[in-house]
Image (cartoon, rainbow, N blue to C red):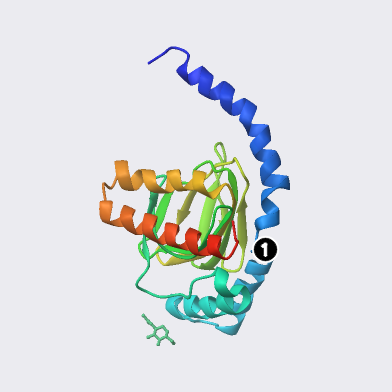
Amino acid sequence: MNLFFIPSIIALFSILAPVLRYGKDHILPANYVFKPAELQEIVQTTLAENPGANNTALFTALGHKFSDRYGPYVKDLNYDDWHFSNAGGAMGTFFIFHASFTEYLIVFGSATGTEGHTGYHLADDYFIIVSGEQSAAYPGENMPTIYKPGEMHHLSYGTAQQYAMPPGSFAIELAQGYIPTMLIFGFLDSIFSTADPFNLWLQIKFTTISMFKNLLLGKI
Ligand SMILES: *[C@@H]1O[C@H](CO)[C@@H](O)[C@H](O)[C@H]1NC(C)=O
């Protein structure tokens, strides 16, 4: 490999980084349909209205609320289109309510529990706990921050943490930013770790269909 390859990539990125951040702060938000605080309120209301409900009942109630509030921008919840997420060493299952070039909204979690690297993303990530909990820590922290049902964990654009979720934990996740760049992270483990072409196909299929449908609605 050329001696200058890695320094060149770093130099290129340091020139691009401020441009990308300006776009994220000033250009992309005009395309956003979702608001983190509003989604958190929907999750909190759902939890308050369904005390002691199991995950299936909570997801169903959330799906109805999303469809009422966001109409054609979200897909109706079903139990056929869930697939695995393998990314950053963590494994979970998810359903895509919405994917476009600037946002995605999913329900993500794991029946068995999971742990891994959040990834560095060119997007803000909002993780609103529905059941169980999530713990997360930056390098050097020797105690995690713990997020409980109804609480929202905002992982800022360009930062990364280690995170864990015990069995049966699920969350509503909203990402806002350069979504196509996040997909690379979302696909790598399915290629190089699990070597699961069936799941990779489902990920690509459901993401692409949702992006295309939203594009037809004029949603970038
Ligand atoms: C979850 O709760 C619903 C509604 O109370 C119930 O019909 C369903 O059987 C429960 N599912 C499980 C797996 O316990």
Residue 136 position within the rendered picture, expressed as x and y whole percent measured from the top left:
54, 50
Residue 82 position within the rendered picture, expressed as x and y whole percent measured from the top left:
37, 66
Q: Can the viewer see residue 118? A: no
Task: Name the image quarter holding residue 207.
Answer: bottom left
Task: Name the image quarter holding residue 46.
Answer: bottom right
Q: Quadrant of the C terminus?
A: bottom right
Q: Residue at x 62, y 61 (%)?
A: 152
Residue 51 position within the rendered picture, expressed as x and y whole percent measured from the top left:
55, 82
Q: Find the residue positioned furthest to the right.
A: 26
Q: Residue at x 60, y 68 (%)?
A: 150
Disc 1 packing (10 Å; few <14; some 14–19; many ≥20): few
Q: Residue at x 49, y 81 (%)?
A: 53
* Relative to 204, residue 132 above or below: below
Residue 129 position within the rendered picture, expressed as x and y whole percent measured from the top left:
55, 65
Position of residue 24 in the picture relative to residue 188 (left or right)? right
Q: Nearer the viewer, residue 168 or 83?
A: 83
Q: As shown in the figure, which amino acid type bears the numbered disc 1? A: Lys
Q: Nearer the viewer, residue 204 or 153?
A: 204
Task: Name the image quarter holding residue 110.
Answer: bottom left
Q: Find the residue positioned furthest to the top.
A: 3
| Element assignment for label 1 | loop
| Residue labelled with disc 1 | 35
Position of residue 44 in the picture relative to residue 2 (left or right)? right
Q: Quadrant of the N terminus?
A: top left
